[in-house]
Image (cartoon, rainbow, N blue to C red):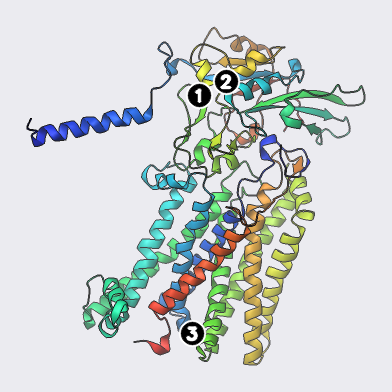
Amino acid sequence: MHPVPFEGFMYPNEVELQWSVLIVLYPFLTGLVAGAFILASLERVFKVDAVKPTYRLALLTALAFLLVAPLPLQLHLGHPERSLEMYLTPHRSSAMAMFGFVYLWYLMAVLVLEIWLDYRRDIVLLAQTSTGWRRWIYRTLTLGSFNLSERSLRIDDKVGWIITVIGIPSAFLLHGYVGFIFGSVKANPWWASPLMPVVFLFSAMVSGIAAVMLLYQFTARIRKTPVDMRCLDTVAKYLFYTFVVDFTLEMLDLIQRIYVADESFRSLDFMVHTRLWMSQVVIQILMGTVAPIAILGLAQVYKLGEAVRRRMYTLAGVLTLIGILAMRWNVVIGGQLFSKSFLGYTTYKMGFATREGLLPAAVLLILPFLILWVLLKLLPPWTEQKV
Amino acid sequence: MSVTRRHFLTLTGGAALAWDFLLAGTPEESPNYKMADHWWGMLIDVTKCIGSGNCVRACAEENDVPDGFFRTWVEHYHVNDWHLENPVVESLDGGMHGFPVVPEGTGKDFFIPKMCNHCADSPCTQVCPVGATFVTPDGVVLVDEKYCLGCRYCIQACPYGCRYLHPTKHVAQKCTLCYHRITKGLTTACCEACPTGARQLVDLKNPKDPIHDFLKTHSVQVLKPHLATGAKAFYNGLDGSVR
């Protein structure tokens, strides 16, 4: 029968978890996309010039992660060959079906278009200067538009700006909607919360900003170019502010749950104190939230040397990403560890080299970085090397 | 023989239609059954259930339910006078093999048969991204196995734990209320196998169905009424401790 150990009473069909580590990855990846895009829009729309060196890097990061985001879902489906039906015959009352369109809108109408418009001048110049297969790639990427007149570049800029303005609510929608997919499941009290989309959105911004901050430092080190400290300090400042809002929202949710203490509370409270203690309290809250907020806060309050600040930002960024990944884990896996009868708890057994095991999950986490590497080679975002 | 363009187009169109019918297969015939005339549900009389597990076995056999999964199951509740909100519940193998005799003691013991509630406002059909699971016009929640993606959103959305993913077909499955039987005028396998008549298939649109008199004279409840799912598994004698 069921090899999965459980305690108390579970409805007999509940013992095995339905959504695996791959579904943990999915909101993590889309969160990075939304966060990176919102960081990029700071420069474009809100004219925060200091973050300019990260603008294109953030856009390419968003694209790399967005391309990989559907893969864990695809791998998880019982019938991946039928997945296109979601677009062809969508069920309009389904949050998941409508998300397919939100994803497609964001990928095609916002991100790809904005990147193309921003890079069009570079692509045309690269198509004229490069040789061999690269020349053909760039020629294809121009989509036949070689016009680099003042007027056409002005139009590019104007349209790009409009797309970014549309892109901000789209990015909000993208990740707010991921939260809605969980928050709208009324059968599951761990998920069902109107705050869920908002919490997901802010945690997305936190993870995206942290990822770009780390990538910016990492690429500067690899390329042996100096880090623009004004840029890094500004990014870290935004990370700090967003993180404070995110933490406040999560604590509001927690306080509300504790105070209201509805029928599910005793069960969920027991779960947090036992099965989720390490992943939620230690890794997500203490290590992944309180510690990076404290580190980033210290950097805001005290005047510290450049080298120290850089190390602090790196540490805070890494801890933040671990914390947000843990948050996704606790939502997705945590939401399935207790019985909907509130009388029992089950265990998640993760395979290794299985279809939904740790190995494919690790590959899917590494894949966006490989795609990003290709994108960086193809479309160099470095401001100091602009063609 | 020469084929004109007009003929060719007519022929290919006709062939495509015929092929579609071939793929869809022939539906089971129930010529006298009109969906609009029925609104199915189930009456479960807790006071009559003796926990024999006959219903679970009959369902598994009738519907080829894979081992370790259940379209219906029976729970044994033990409620202590001091802990009304903390019942001790067990359902080993879904109660398929019955339950050991409960020794006399404090508190009370009873059995609760569970199954899909065939909700009128079912959260599971709401979330299905392709509409593979749906409520039929006669009030039965079904899954189209040829269309289901196996995303398992419906399993998450069911508050009663009634759905599972078939281990080899990789599609969601659940109680069909023996739709292949009830559309032919038969009752469900679980109702037929119940030795005490604790389960009774009901047709709310049938004015002659005894359910109407039963509802008038008994206090009947549904599971988790606060979730407003429009559940149609009606329980008589349901204890407040049942989840």
Q: Position of residue A275 (x, y in %)?
A: 76, 53
Q: Which amino acid type corresponds to the residue marked 2 in the rendered image?
A: Gly
- Residue A64 placement, left or right of A205: left
Mark 3 = which residue? A50
Q: Determine if marks 3 and 1 fall on one subunit.
A: no
Residue B91 in sight from this viewpoint: no
**Which image quarter is the C terminus of chain B in?**
top right
| C-alpha separation, residue under disc 1 versus residue under disc 2 | 8 Å
Q: Image point 64% across, 54% down: which residue? A: A331
Label 1 packing within 10 angstroms: few (<14), some (14-19), many (20+):
many
- Answer with the quarter of the image where residue B160 lies: top right
Are there few (<14), some (14-19), or many (20+) residues within 10 Å of tag 3? Answer: some
Residue A162 is situated, as x and y percent measured from the top left of the image, at 34, 69
Disc 2: which residue: B41
Residue tagged 1: B139
Find numbered disc 1 in the image and state the secondary structure of the residue it sits on: loop
Subunit of label 2: B
- Would you say A128 lies left or right of B126 here? left
Cβ atoms at labels 3 and 1 below 8 Å apart: no
- Regarding residue A240, the answer to whether it shows in the image is yes
Left or right of B158: which side holds A337? right
Residue type, mark 1 in image: Gly
Asked whether the beta carbons under mark 1 and mark 2 sit within 8 Å of each other, the answer is: yes
Quick one: B120 or B96, which is closer to the camera? B96
